[in-house]
Image: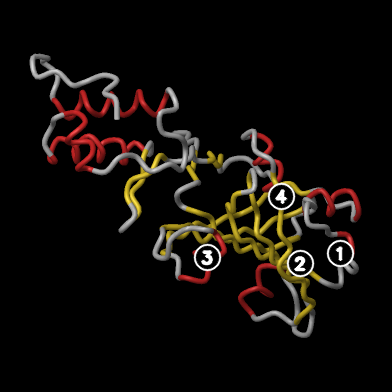
């Protein structure tokens, strides 16, 4: 390995900070690409002639910034930039990915008509015996799994909805264009979770990775609940952005 910008012991800047900036520069100029493992602690110590403590401080600072991430037993990798989710905007997954410059695709895992439990019946305002359409999809941005979404909608109101859906369909677009629904607002609840192996495998992340469990109820212009969605969002790819106003 060639030293591009060695740290200086005569500089007033701390060694760990100098190394931190050297690593940042290496990432910026493409020496290490997104998703690529950076050199080990031992290799960095030898390359820049610094101690393990200095290396750990520099790497930890970049991990805390979100520029790097650690994978237990595998090493430290260059992070992929997070998708910023603006909580004040009601957009579909497809619209959100497009806004971030990513190509949105979906993998349709399951479509079922069934009688729901109270957990899914109550948010939709359904009575006993009324059925829902359950749509389970893996959502991808630029081919990378971003979220696992399960949507519940009234079967009586949206009969044959399942026939309108394709792998790449935007559910919101189908509701608006095929059923004349005008979606206006949604209520969301976010809960941090740790992924088990099955969900982690679907989202292509290590087991015990952090994620968000998000419940969304979406309403139309007449304030009627249209869909109830449970989403499992990758914690390493999501950044929440909120605007707070003092009254």
> In this rendering, which labeled residue sits more in front, label 1 or label 2?
1
> Judging from the image, what secondary structure is the residue with disc 1 in?
helix
Establish if 103 lies above or below 16. below
Give the CA distance from mark 1 to mark 2. Answer: 9 Å
**Of pointers 1 and 4, the one earlier in the residue sequence:** 4
Disc 3 + disc 1, Cβ < 8 Å: no
* The image quarter in which residue 157 lies: bottom right
Give the CA distance from mark 1 to mark 4. Answer: 19 Å
Give the CA distance from mark 2 to mark 4. Answer: 21 Å
Residue picked out by circle 4: 105
Residue picked out by circle 1: 161
Identify the mark at residue 153; answer none if there is no mark: 2
Disc 1 + disc 2, Cβ < 8 Å: yes
**Of pointers 3 and 4, the one earlier in the residue sequence:** 4
Disc 1 + disc 4, Cβ < 8 Å: no
Give the CA distance from mark 3 to mark 2. Answer: 27 Å
**Of pointers 3 and 2, the one earlier in the residue sequence:** 2
Establish if 133 lies above or below 62. below
Q: Quadrant of the N terminus?
A: top left
Establish if 97 lies above or below 229. above
Residue picked out by circle 3: 201
Disc 3 + disc 4, Cβ < 8 Å: no
Question: Which residue appears at 22% of the width and 34% of the height?
Answer: 58
């Amino acid at each position: 390995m060639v030293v591009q910008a060695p740290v200086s012991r005569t500089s007033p800047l701390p060694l760990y900070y100098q190394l931190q900036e050297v690593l940042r520069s290496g990432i910026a100029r493409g020496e290490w690409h997104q998703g690529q493992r950076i050199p080990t602690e031992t290799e960095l110590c030898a390359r820049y002639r610094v101690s393990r403590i200095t290396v750990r401080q520099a790497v930890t600072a970049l991990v805390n910034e979100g520029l790097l991430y650690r994978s237990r037993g595998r090493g430290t990798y260059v992070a992929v930039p997070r998708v910023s989710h603006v909580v004040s905007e009601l957009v579909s997954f497809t619209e959100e990915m497009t806004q971030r410059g990513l190509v949105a695709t979906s993998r349709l895992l399951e479509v079922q008509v069934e009688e729901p439990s109270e957990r899914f019946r109550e948010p939709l305002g359904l009575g006993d015996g009324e059925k829902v359409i359950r749509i389970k999809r893996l959502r991808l941005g630029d081919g990378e799994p971003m979220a696992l979404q399960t949507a519940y909608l009234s079967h009586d109101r949206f009969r044959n909805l399942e026939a309108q859906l394709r792998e790449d369909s935007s559910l919101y677009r189908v509701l608006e264009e095929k059923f004349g629904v005008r979606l206006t607002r949604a209520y969301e609840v976010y809960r941090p979770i740790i992924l088990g192996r099955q969900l982690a495998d679907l989202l292509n992340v290590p087991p015990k990775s952090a994620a968000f469990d998000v419940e969304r109820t979406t309403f139309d212009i007449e304030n009627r609940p249209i869909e109830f969605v449970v989403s499992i969002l990758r914690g390493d790819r999501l950044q929440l952005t909120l605007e707070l106003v003092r009254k």
